[in-house]
Amino acid sequence: MATQLKTPSVKDQVSAEEWALRVDLAAAYRLVAHYGWDDLIFTHLSVRVPGPEHHFLINPYNLMFEEITASSLVKIDVNGHPVMETPYLTNPAGFTIHSAIHMAREDAHAVIHLHTPHGQAVSAHAEGLMPLTQTAMLIRDELTYHHYEGVATDLDERERLVEDLGPTKTAMILRNHGTLTVGSTVAEAFIKMYFLERACEAQIHALAGGQDLINHPPQGTPEKAAEQGRDGLKIVGNMLAWPALLRKLDRIDPSFRD
């Protein structure tokens, strides 16, 4: 019989606004697991908690993503240390990437970082993400790159990471490492990650057939698609796709809301 973890509810201990963020972030973790993007207990998704304290929500370090609930998320400070009592482990080193972006970008309320095989494969490719599919062209204008510096435990790397992300980009390929997206909401960050990951997957499949067989889009088309995707992904993510994804999760297992 499968073991079901039960975490005491914290709904009465937090604001309604924070609870709504907890539900959305727990949903994002479940969706990452559903689409097979998780990496055991590693990588992180985080969201900023409103208020002057600069607190954030992140996953317990010792739970699989399909186990995460709104109440099991850990509220931490900018150094990755819990600020509420929790029975779970935290990983301060794992918050290095997230803290850098949250602190530098006011619009970066949500940050998602993954280590999928397709994302890592594109991160190791000299050309990075290529404009081979509509999905890639829609997200590519939002994309920037950061060179690999080893496991992200060095706080000095935060400055270079922020510089590479810049003031407006919302997607990043961490060279030889993985993918990252930011958003004003969890929904926005997730939908951008969905497009980025699907683009990476399609590129690896296309290149498997041989570079000489690739059909490149006509000149000017990638730029046109990028313009179409700039606001479209945000609108589609927040207003259309995210509510549908929450309904999907409710059908599969609504315990993420606990």
Image (cartoon, helix red, strand yellow):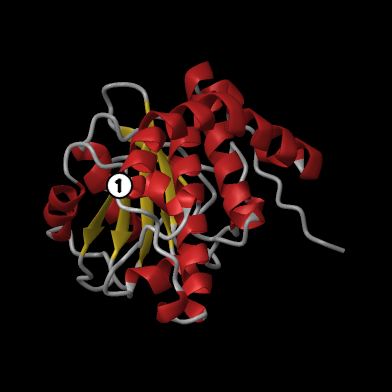
- Name above or below for residue 112 compared with residue 42: above
| Residue 110 in view | no
Q: How dense is the environment of label 1, judged by Cα within 10 Å: few (below 14), some, or many (20 and up)?
A: few
Give the camera-side residue of 98 and 4: 98
Tell me what residue is drawn at x 41 percent, y 79 percent. Answer: 211
Give the camera-side residue of 179 and 59: 179
Q: Which residue is mark 1?
A: 220
Classify the position of the N terminus by image quarter. bottom right
- Name above or below for residue 99 compared with residue 8: below
Left or right of 226: which side holds 234? right
What element does badge 1 sit on? loop
Give the camera-side residue of 208 and 172: 208
Classify the position of the C terminus by image quarter. top right
Image x and y of residue 80, in percent: 32, 48
Q: Name the quadrant containing residue 35.
A: bottom right
Tell me what residue is drawn at x 59 percent, y 37 percent. Answer: 71
Image x and y of residue 143, in percent: 29, 50
Tell me what residue is drawn at x 31 percent, y 40 percent. Answer: 77
- Name above or below for residue 224 compared with residue 17: below
Left or right of 154: which side holds 173? right
Left or right of 197: which side holds 225? left
Q: Amino acid at mark 1?
A: Gly
- Name above or below for residue 99 compared with residue 62: above
| Residue 222 in view | yes
Tell me what residue is drawn at x 49 percent, y 19 percent. Answer: 17
Residue lying furthest front: 218
Image x and y of residue 193, in percent: 46, 49
Give the camera-side residue of 177 and 27: 177
Image x and y of residue 90, in percent: 42, 54
Residue lying furthest top: 16
Query: Number of marks in the image?
Result: 1
